[in-house]
Amino acid sequence: MLSSVAVKTLVNRVCLSWRPAVTGLMSARGYRGEAPEDTKGDLIDIPLPPWEEKTGESIDIKRRRLLYESRKRGMLENCILLSHFAKRYLDTMSETQLRQYDRLINEPTNDWDIYYWATEALPTPEPYEGEIMDMLKEYTKNRDREQRLDAPNLEYLDK
């Protein structure tokens, strides 16, 4: 059985003998300097079918679908923002407002666009401007400083 001193000596010798080999494998540039140009050659453009408004849907079914679609987004920021917005306003929206909201959350192919419009980081394109977008922008400002760290529980639906 080796003593603890012998084990430490052996480990130090092995580690020191590996160190130059590992260092030699690293790029001389490391993480310093300019990043190489991104040609975006690795991106694949996947065409999405155009959004179509669902017809023949009852108001109750539309509200339930929009609630689900507000909670299940492609990014957490919108999941939180839209699910809280839906909890607050979905039950009181008129049929016209529901159509606007449906188009707003389902027609754009990039969830970041919706987030940037709601936070007013980018101007909202004309087709999405309207009463619902104004409500969402105001809601996003969170003037009451509510804590919105995750999507609301679904228990409020049982009331």
Image (spheres, grey):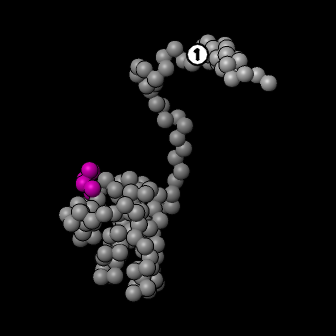
Tell me if 16 is positioned left or right of 84 in this view: right
- Quarter of the picture holding the C terminus: bottom left
**Main secondary-structure element of the magenta-colored stretch:** loop
Looking at the rendering, the stretch of residues picked out in magenta corresponds to 119-124
Asked if residue 125 can be seen in this view, the reply is no
Nearer the observer, 122 or 86: 86
Q: Quadrant of residue 143?
A: bottom left
Residue pictured at 35% horizontal, 58% vertical:
114
Examine the rendered structure and indicate whether residue 131 appears above or below residue 17.
below
Residue pictured at 40% horizontal, 70% vertical:
152
Q: Quadrant of residue 51?
A: bottom left
Residue pictured at 24% horizontal, 69% vertical:
135
Asked if residue 123 can be seen in this view, the reply is yes
Residue 33 percent location from the top left of the image: 41, 19
Dot 1 amino acid type: Thr
Crowd band around label 1 with a 10 angstrom C-alpha radius: few (<14), some (14–19), many (20+)? few
Residue 53 percent location from the top left of the image: 43, 73
In the rendered image, the residue lying farthest to the right is: 1
User: Is residue 94 a member of the stretch shown in magenta?
Assistant: no
Residue bearing mark 1: 23
Residue 105 percent location from the top left of the image: 39, 65
Nearer the observer, 71 or 143: 143
Tell me if 8 is positioned left or right of 156 in this view: right
Residue pictured at 27% horizontal, 50% vertical:
122
Nearer the observer, 152 or 77: 152
Is disc 1 placed on a helix, strand or loop? helix
- Quarter of the picture holding the N terminus: top right
Tell me if 3 is positioned left or right of 52 in this view: right
